[in-house]
Image (cartoon, helix red, strand yellow):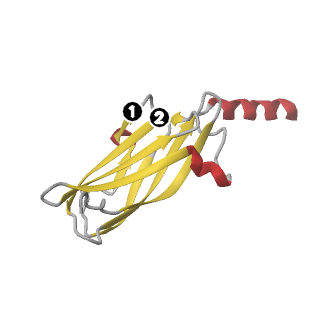
Amino acid sequence: MTPVWKWLLVVTACCLVPGLAATVHAKDAKSLYILSPELQADPEGQGRATLTVKATQGYKWNKEFPCKVVIGEQKGAKLARTKYAKGDVKLADGDKTAIFDLGATGKVEPGTTITGKASFSLCTKKVCKIFMNKDVTWKPAPASGK
């Protein structure tokens, strides 16, 4: 096999495997998605944490990519798990929105904070972009009406 054919074979393989075609390194890559961590408390003060990833600019959630959320420090909160994966995602809005329901956190007090990292991929019909270890911080939502 000539070097040209080997090169062509590698390029073709990269285009066929989701996520291999492109990894984002551009400064404006964050504009392709919106991360929305929420830590909501019910009237009794019990919290629930979610992470919503909304794709923008014509991108959609890559269902084939092994996405994950890994929880780091939990200050004043206690989630049942520290790792969430593809099976924990609910898709909405024509696969433009992915929601990780991280579950109950226990009582939410002022100063409660959860940190973590999210890894995921977004695609158009032509290209997939991979976002690895994006920092996420959950803090209590401000009380409404006060």
| 32 with respect to 46 (left or right) | right
Residue occupying image coordinates x 64% and y 51%: 28
Would you call the spot at circle 1 few (<14 residues within 10 Å), some (14-19), or many (20 or more)?
A: few
Would you call the spot at circle 2 few (<14 residues within 10 Å), some (14-19), or many (20 or more)?
A: many
| Residue 62 in picture, x, y percent from top left | 51, 35
Q: Nearer the viewer, residue 81 or 124?
A: 124
User: Disc 2 vs disc 1: Cβ atoms closer than 8 Å?
Assistant: yes
| 64 with respect to 140 (left or right) | right
Quadrant of res 73: bottom left
Residue occupying image coordinates x 25% and y 65%: 77
Q: From the viewer's perspective, is residue 128 above or below residue 70? A: above
User: Which quarter of the rendering shows the N terminus?
Assistant: top right
User: Which quarter of the rendering shows the C terminus?
Assistant: bottom left
Q: Nearer the viewer, residue 118 or 83?
A: 118
The residue type indicated by label 2 comes to Lys
| 88 with respect to 78 (left or right) | right
Q: Is residue 13 visible?
A: yes
| Residue 44 in picture, x, y percent from top left | 12, 59
Residue at which label 1 appears: 92
The residue type indicated by label 1 comes to Ala
Q: Is residue 66 visible?
A: no
| Residue 52 in picture, x, y percent from top left | 40, 46
Residue at which label 2 appears: 96
Q: From the viewer's perspective, is residue 52 above or below residue 41? A: above
| Residue 138 in picture, x, y percent from top left | 36, 60
Residue occupying image coordinates x 86% and y 35%: 3
